[in-house]
Amino acid sequence: MGLLSKKDAKLITDPLADNNPITIQVLGICSALAITAELEASIVMSISVLFVLGVGNVVISLMRNIIPSKIRIIVQLIVVATLVIIVDLVLKAFAYELSKTLSVFVGLIITNCIIMGRFEAFALGNGPWRSFLDGIGNAAGYGVILIIVGFFRELLGSGTLLGIPVLGDPIEKTGLYSIGYENNGFMLLSPMALIVVGIIIWVQRTRNKALVEDH
Amino acid sequence: MEHLELFLKSIFIDNMVFATFLGMCSYLAVSKKVSTAVGLGAAVIFVLAITVPLNWLLDQYLLQPGALSWLGEEYAAYDLSFLSFIMFIATIATMVQLVEIVVEKFSPSLYNSLGIFLPLIAVNCAILGGSLFMQSREIATLGLATTYGIGSGIGWFLAILAIAAIREKIRYSNVPPALRGLGITFIITGLMAIGFMSFGGMLTGGDDEAAKETKSAQVDELNDTEKELANNTKVIE
């Protein structure tokens, strides 16, 4: 850890597990769940949030001494909106099909509570380098959950990963399908995303008793 | 009739929380007590009813490809739609501030019940989502946009009211310790969303027509599953 001091490294590793933005802080669920039916969409969404949160945190942190506190929310929204427009245009240019699948959810990164939450709680009070690390860490924590959910939903729902069949061919009856396995189409429907996240929370809290709530 | 159909559809079929997961953060954070849930829900209806029509006007006369033609021939080729995110969010943030000031001035009692929730709402995904869906579903008139805004708001209100009531009662049940609080709320919401899916055929009487009419990602997913099911049945035959 030559580059990062212990305290800085903690900024990145903490949000990955014990202070995860989705399962512990309950932020940013809005845009997370609807797009996790496919692993590819989840990965692209995680990268977009990583970019917006990393860069946004640095920008806000650089401006923290000149933003009047009364209008800070509007300033923050404009910064995020600009970054999200960049992401949206890049996606439209290089991955048009995918940007159609994500539809309005790219735009909804603007109101992703993780981003506003990190701006308010961290970037307004810390220097650019630490804010950058904090942004990357939290976006990665968000990405991990998205990718886990996307992995299980695509695997169990359509038997593919990133569009590649991994369990055999359901029509030709090869691989697992030859012994009577069926895809669970229910996993592709949106309610299952909630239930999968619920199960992730359950597993995490069983492993770490300190996180258990008393109602 | 058109209005009634859109109204019912935005409350039940395209419910903000259960079909598109919008506004989940505040939905989970503020649903511990029925009384606060009602306050936030009312504020969401209020703000959606104002911002959706307003953003419809912006979209129609400023942002769409060719929308500037009312300024003159030479402006007809402009396409400002890439600015829609920034315009929508700026409108929402300013409207929320404005509404807060006006309500505080003219109706202190309403302000006391809504007041603390209003600033929260500027960053509620349901509000921006309402405007973005209004744009992507190409809602045709100002009247319909207003209906859509109010309907979506009521749908969100219903959802948060229902989960708050359930969470008040679930205190008396024996939930596994690790699932208490957040975990069980997620799972209940999932089950409620499955329940709301049964409204799917309410207006059109058939899934095929419903699928043609809505363009949401939700329905696309449903379609894929249907195709897959159809494939599976073919194999069985």
Image (spheres, helix red, strand yellow):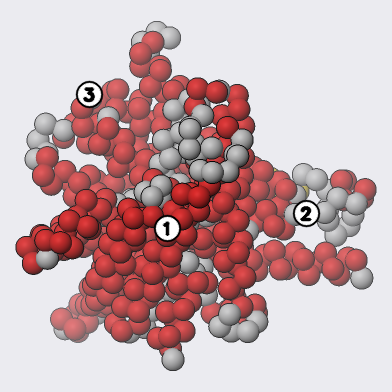
Residue A45: give its label: none
Residue B95 position by quadrant: bottom left
Q: CA distance from mark 1 to mark 3?
A: 38 Å
Identity of the residue drawn at 24% across and 71% down: B50
1 vs 3, front mark? 1
Residue A183: give its label: 2
Q: Residue B158 placed where, x, y %?
A: 43, 65
Q: Is B20 on the left-hand or right-hand side of A119?
A: right
Q: Secondary structure at mark 2?
A: loop
Type of amino acid under label 2: Asn
Identity of the residue drawn at 83% across and 48% down: A168
Identity of the residue drawn at 78% across and 70% down: B230
Type of amino acid under label 1: Ile
Residue marked by disc 1: B160
2 vs 1, front mark? 1
In the rendered view, tell whether residue B162 sits above or below residue A165.
below
- How crowded is the residue under tag 1: few (<14 C-alpha within 10 Å), some, or many (20+)? many
In the rendered view, tell whether residue B223 sits above or below residue A191.
below
Please give the chain letter of the residue carrying mark 2. A
Residue marked by disc 3: A127
Q: Is A10 on the left-hand or right-hand side of B220?
A: left
2 vs 3, front mark? 2
Q: Is A94 on the left-hand or right-hand side of B174?
A: left
Identity of the residue drawn at 60% across and 56% down: B191
Q: Residue A210 placed where, x, y %?
A: 50, 22
Identify which residue, A158 or B68, lies in the foreground.
Answer: A158
Residue B132 in view of the camera: no
